Amino acid sequence: MTWLFLTGAILTETTASLSLRMASRGGSRKWFLAVVTGFLAAFAFLTLALDGGMALGVAYGIWAATGVALAAISSRILFREPLTKVMGLGIALIATGVLLIELGAAH
């Protein structure tokens, strides 16, 4: 269940961040509601993952890194923001770092 909670934290945080982008463009109040709701849900899911026994370093590392990667890819698709080769390399390095943290926590 901890991985399911962590996935919920990642998806709701990314949704909240993308909604924040919409709200900053002069969007309606519904975008601000999505921002607040998304971030509250993200922290609630992260709390549940930690309460389920997931290590903080692992949970936070995966949550933050995956959120960065999803936000970059999603903003490219939704907002036509740049996603360069260098940014792709950065995402790959983030994924590698998170994998190393996960493997290190297993020992």
Image: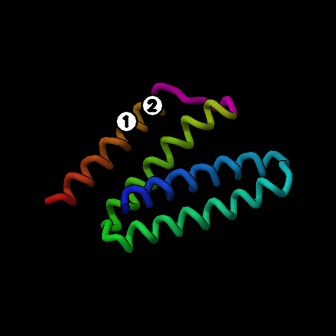
Quadrant where the image shows the C terminus: bottom left
Indicate left or right for 84 with 39 as reference.
left
Q: Position of residue 55 (x, y in %)?
A: 30, 67
Which residue, given by chain and number where applicable, does mark 1 sit on? 92
Q: Main secondary structure of the magenta part?
A: loop
Task: Identify the residue at image location x=38%, y=43%.
Answer: 94
Which element type, helix, strand or loop, lies under badge 2? helix
Picture coordinates of residue 1, whole percent (x, y): 37, 61
Name of the residue lying farthest toward the front:
1
Query: In this figure, which residue is indicated by the disc labeled 2?
Result: 88
The answer to which image quadrant residue 5 occupies is bottom left
Part of the protein shown in magenta:
79-85
Left or right: residue 67 versus residue 19 is left
> Residue at the top extreme?
85
Residue occupying image coordinates x 37% and y 57% = 3
Label 1: few (<14), some (14–19) or many (≥20) C-alpha neighbours in 10 Å: few
Q: How is the image coloured?
A: rainbow
Q: Secondary structure at mark 1?
A: helix
Callout 2: 10 Å neighbours few (<14), some, many (20+)?
some
Q: Position of residue 25 (x, y in %)?
A: 80, 45
When asked about the image quadrant of residue 74, the answer is top right
- Residue sitting at x 35%, y 67%: 56
